Image: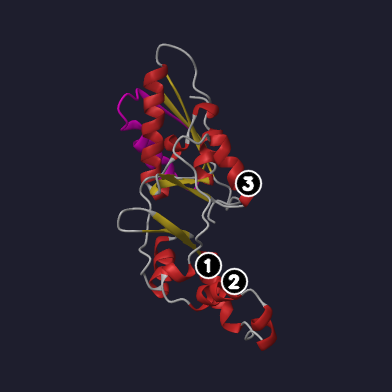
Amino acid sequence: MRIKSLLARDLTTTEVVTVPPSMPVTSLARLLADRGISSAPVTSPEGKLLGIVTEADLLRRLAGAEDAPVSWLRGLFGNAERQADTYARTHGLVAADVMTKDVITVAPDATAEHCAHLMEEHRIKRLPVVQEGRLLGIVSRADLLRVVLEAPERAGSSQTADASIRAALRAELRDQPWAGSLYAASEVKDGVVTLFGFVQSDAVRRGRCVLAGRIQGVVRVDDKMINSPGLLPGEFV
């Protein structure tokens, strides 16, 4: 499967932590810290995407405590709507108050290239995948980088089977937080999974090999991974 044939639906992580608009800001901050995530979509009970709360939104609220009061003259001639929105975002008590409402999203049939373009243009790390207003999942920079690192699918009689193994392997790696890495990749040919790149430890190496070997259709796992020499750029951000 070549990169150009991949769509957002192929890359989407569907297990996404979402929050209701009524969640208190203090609970939001604790959730992001405990889960080790930098943002959380805000959704209605029906699953409609209402906005997204990021670490930047919460930091803006904290920093707003030191903002100087709006002068009488500025209040008279300034943009009242903008001032009210700023006040709500810096003093709000729940997710609906502090969330970013103008969220950049993509449809399930958006190409990988388009997703990458939007991330680069708007300097964002993840894109909510939305269909008819409902949140389906998230495409992250890590999802796109893993696609780039994976070798293109080769033509042949085992093409379909290899594609299924590759998709299953990607899904399994997403489900195991310890197994993901921007610097570890894989290749599948004729049922043989080759794992290469950097890993954090021998335990992670062993776990990735076991994980790959359990996937249906895999006939062998070749370990070509090497231990990381230290912290790699972006790996633990």
Residue underneath mark 3: 120
Q: For the point 55% across and 28% down, which residue is it? A: 4
Relative to residue 23, is residue 123 depicted above or below? Answer: above
Q: For the point 43% across and 68% down, which residue is it? A: 96
Please name whichever residue, 26 or 198, is drawn nearer the observer in this view of the structure. Answer: 26
Amino acid type, callout 2: Arg
Q: Residues within 10 Å of mark 2 (few under 14, many from 20)?
A: few
Relative to residue 5, is residue 132 depicted above or below? Answer: below
Q: Closer to the camera: disc 2 or disc 1?
A: 2
Q: Residues within 10 Å of mark 1 (few under 14, many from 20)?
A: some
Place of residue 203 in the rendered image (x, y in percent of width and height, measured from the top left): 40, 46
Residue 2 in view in this figure? yes
Residue underneath mark 1: 57
| First in sequence: mark 1 vs mark 3 | 1
Q: Residue furthest bottom?
A: 72
Residue underneath mark 2: 82
| First in sequence: mark 2 vs mark 3 | 2
| 217 is within the stretch colored magenta | yes
| First in sequence: mark 2 vs mark 1 | 1
Q: Which residues are magenta?
A: 199-223
